[in-house]
Image (tube, rainbow, N blue to C red):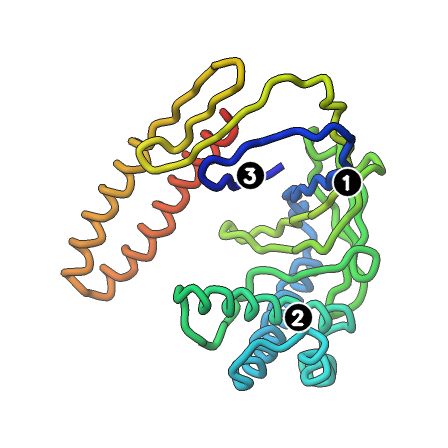
Amino acid sequence: MGGIALSPLTFIYLYSESIIMKLTKTIVLKLREGEGEGESDLEDTINAFTEGMNYASEIVYRHNKPISSVSLQKLSYRYLRDNIGLKSQMACNVCRQVSGAYESLKEKIKVKRAKWQLLTFAPTNVTFSYGRDFTINSDMLSITTLRGRKKYRIVNYRYAEQFFDGSWKYLASKLVKHKDGRYYFHLSCEKEIEEPDITKVSNFMGVDVGMNYLAVATTTDKKNRFFRGGDIKNVRNIYEKQRERLQKKGTRSAKRVLKHLSGREKRLIRDINHVVSKEV
């Protein structure tokens, strides 16, 4: 399960009755190479889906405010179907995804982290809905493309096998073209799990998060663990100096390097935070 975002001085406390929780996972499955003509179907489908998203995005942008996926579907469905050639479920997924993107933009605007703008989408992925335009088993993926239903073999691996044991519910998932030019299926799934009987648990943990210490964990049996924030501070200081130097240059190549540095810094910090969350 993904990391848990903890607000300052958050206590993980336990209830005296069982709780049903939903565990959500996304696993990345590689499509086998050598599908030949099938790969061109994937490319064309991703391009058409992206074209549809950018068309729907322009409609929302002209409204100057987010609109619901249902309203957007009424305004764009026929064009998406007749002019772009999307299948019915794809057209619906386009509207849901674009509507959700503008809702996220609205939340950023509220906290002054963004301004109203036209959102554009790159041709890197397409969303599918389980049971409607995709089905999957341990070695085969069946999806709807622009040219109809197609089957693709997937590369399974030991860890992923547990997600095909019948206990997981499959959710909307994505076909993604990675930077290496290969296609991967990002399968999202969930299942309900029951928390163990915690009436027998006598120990509690409190976690305080901050800057000098990324996390301080304390338990009721007086055990403490400190996670220093020095590594992240060093990373930020190094990249801040590099940004200042490149911003002074102001050249086109410097701007490209700035964009690259931003992504690298985020990945490093995310990795450090992930390690800390696993330790906690």
Res. 82 image quadrant: bottom right
Q: Position of residue 110 (x, y in %)?
A: 46, 67
Within 10 angstroms of label 2, few (less than 14), some, or many (20 or more) residues? many
Q: Amino acid at mark 3?
A: Ile
- Secondary structure type for disc 1: strand
Nearer-N-terminus badge (2/3) = 3
Mark 3 vs 1, N-terminal side? 3
User: Residue placed at 51% from the left, 20% from the top?
Assistant: 219
Few, some or many C-alpha atoms within 10 Å of disc 3 (few <14, some 14-19, many ≥20)?
few
Name the residue beneath numbered marker 2: 94
Q: Position of residue 71 (x, y in %)?
A: 69, 80
Judge left or right: residue 124 versus residue 92.
left
Q: Is residue 76 above or below residue 259?
A: below
Which residue corresponds to the image point at 38% horizontal and 50% vertical from the top-left? 263
Q: Are marks 3 and 1 in contact (CB under 8 Å)?
A: no
What x and y, as percent, mark residue 131? Answer: 83, 56
- What is the C-alpha distance between the residues marked 2 and 3? 29 Å
- Residue identified by numbered label 1: 191
Q: Residue at x 51, y 50 (%)?
A: 180
Mark 2 or mark 1: name the one nearer the start of the chain.
Answer: 2
Q: What residue is drawn where x is 69% and y is 48%?
A: 188
Occupied quadrant, residue 32: top right
Give the side of residue 139 with respect to residue 201, left or right.
right
- From the viewer's perspective, is 187 left or right of 115? right
Which element type, helix, strand or loop, lies under badge 3? Answer: loop
Q: Quadrant of the N terminus?
A: top right
Judging by the rendered image, the residue that carries numbered circle 3 is 4
